[in-house]
Amino acid sequence: MIILGLTGSIAMGKSTVSRLFAQMKRPVFDADKVVHQLQAPNGRLLSAIGQAFPGVIDEKGVNRQKLGAQLLQKPEGFRRLEAIIHPAVVEELHLFLRKNRSHPLVIVDIPLLFEAGFTRSVDYIAVVSAPYWIQKRRAVSRPNMTESRFRGLLARQWPDRKKRQQADFIIENGRNIIALAAQVRQITGCLVGQGSR
């Protein structure tokens, strides 16, 4: 089994690339989805997050807007939050890998692959990248996203340039879905039949 780590900065189109891999019947571990499940009603991280960040839990689980507001006021809280979330994500990742060990290629979609030290868990790394103006346009068009918040999120991530330098594959996402799908097929073809490093 080859484990391809998929990452990219905010609004680069990583989720679209992830869906393209899934459409090719490649198992995809979606760290964002896992985190949402862990923070949903009855999610196993609710208690710990609620204790660390009072007032952010409601009937829908973790209220991400309230949590985000607290983190904007006290950015040091990110470390506390990551200390709660990352071990649970690692646990879920190990379960996913065990479940899918018979597949020749699995995709591990983790936005903070580099920043959170997940590179040791993958064989290869694909970085989704796009020109900054496209990234910014995509980001600020999202609900509840402002330019200020976008800049704050970018500041917490490795620069795109640095990610590209560490990548085995760079997926350029500045054109159209056809070009994007072609790159996904090319990477899949390159890796399937190869052994893990």
Image (cartoon, rainbow, N blue to C red):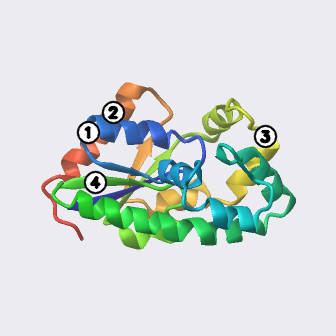
- Give the residue drawn at x 87%, y 58%: 73
* 60 lies above or below 87: above
Q: Residue at x 26, y 64 (%)?
A: 98
Examine the rendering and report whether any part of residue 183 can be seen: no
Task: State which tag comes first along the sequence, 1 or 3.
Answer: 3
x and y, in percent, of residue 128 in the image:
47, 46
Q: Place residue 143 in its image quadrant.
A: top right
Q: CA distance from mark 1 to mark 3?
A: 34 Å
Residues at marks 2 and 4, CA–CA distance in whole angstroms: 17 Å
Q: Is residue 80 visible?
A: yes
Q: Which mark is residue 147?
A: 3
Q: Amino acid at mark 1?
A: Arg
- Circle 4 residue: 106
Q: Which residue is nearer to you in this view: 81 or 133?
A: 81
Q: Which residue position is annotated with label 1?
A: 185
- Contact between marks 2 and 1 (CB within 8 A): the answer is yes
Q: Answer few, some or many: residues within 10 Å of disc 4's Cα (few below 14, many 20 plus, some between 14 and 19).
A: many
